[in-house]
Image (spheres, coloured by chain):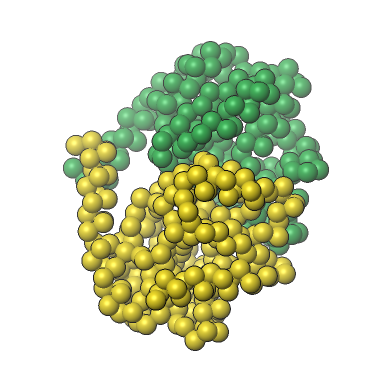
Chain colours: A green, B yellow
Amino acid sequence: MSEIIIMKELLSENKKLAEEYRALYKSKNVLMVNIMGAPGAGKTTFLKAVTEALKDRGIDSAIIEGDLYSSIDADDFNERGIRASQINTCGECHLDAAVIKEGYDKLSFENGVVFVENVGNLICPAEFDLGESVKIVCASVPEGDDKPFKYVPMFSYVDAVVLTKCDLKEAVGFDTDNFKKGLSAISDAPVFEVSLGKDPERSGVEKIVDYILEKRG
Amino acid sequence: MSEIIIMKELLSENKKLAEEYRALYKSKNVLMVNIMGAPGAGKTTFLKAVTEALKDRGIDSAIIEGDLYSSIDADDFNERGIRASQINTCGECHLDAAVIKEGYDKLSFENGVVFVENVGNLICPAEFDLGESVKIVCASVPEGDDKPFKYVPMFSYVDAVVLTKCDLKEAVGFDTDNFKKGLSAISDAPVFEVSLGKDPERSGVEKIVDYILEKRG
């Protein structure tokens, strides 16, 4: 059997599971949000800010952390009082619906928002439905404004884009118009800009929280 | 047949081709260098600086550009007078020995250095031998100093690490010692630091050129 046929079968089995789990998460009043992005795009820092902002609005949240190896980020969230379960893919380049369900079961979580922090990868995760209801990509300013032109499947797959590290725009010569031009050619996803470094500017985070709560309904 | 068995067969076939092509490139007096890294790690900017520095030393070089879509980078190199051939993977997350051979044939190049700019991905390319003689990963400062802890296969696979965008160390709070600690636990690859942004500092590039020429023998 060829690689392509095996891959199609895998994706079709994953899709079935994802549909089943999506219904389950909804029945538990959980909004599952899949956060993707390149290595170092700022996914973890973004999640710290968003879970804090949700807490301020009285909404519970939890994290399923995906990493090839290590539990650095899950440990950090747990220390901050945010429930987090760690999935190690042992070198695999993506998560799938089945491992997310295992991560969810470990959390014992209902009534709130669960964020999946996907493996740092702008390519493979776009193919795998995790049973989420919202798909977000974090793209960081230092990665460059040409990324939507080059990573078409990911940017056309997501519901929303979080542009991170916006305080570095001038230092790296980032052209926001060019980034949005590339994106708008393949997607109508809204772009939320954040700067969460040394002098965090959180108004973008509040807008994303509005967006997430709107999706929660 | 399972995904794992198919994958093992694919990798074993690829390895055989890679060995054959490695011998071919050597017979043409070509040093093939595989440049990997996350999206936006600064691979293209690094290659522009290195090919220029090689030219100044009288060494010819050429580029095989790997991208999911677009030919932005290959066009740019050709305009600069560096021969470049474009490979579009149409969504695939890695290159392999066979497509590199096709890219090489299009270049009609002998006696010098050919750089492969791999697809922006810190995971999948580490599994695929391209027939290269030197494997380099570009890791950018804004990605964070924890990357060698998290992307173990890539950092343990490469011969050398180029740490890019070093001028942003202070702005993003990058801990060089922590980065090197993570790396040295899994690899003895040397680290070359470069800053090629607004005020380029090229002494790091000259050291990498020394390293590459030493490998060329």
A131 horizontally vs A163: left or right: left
Residue found 30% across the figure and 74% down from its top = B26
**x, y percentage for residue A71?**
54, 30
Quadrant position of the C terminus of chain B in the picture: bottom left
Image quarter in which the N terminus of chain B is found: top left
User: Which residue sits at x=42%, y=71%?
Assistant: B215
Residue B157 point in image, percent of width and height: 41, 52
Residue B36 appears anywhere in the view: no
Q: Which residue is depicted at the point 36% across and 30% down?
A: A14
In the foreground, B30 or B63: B30
Residue A95 lies in quadrant: top left
Residue B4 location, x and y as percent? 27, 38
Tell me: B171 left or right of B123: right
Up/down of A60 relative to A209, above or below: above
The residue closer to the viewer here, B9 or A190, is B9
**In the rendered image, is residue B161 in sight?**
yes
Q: Is residue B167 left or right of residue A74?
A: right
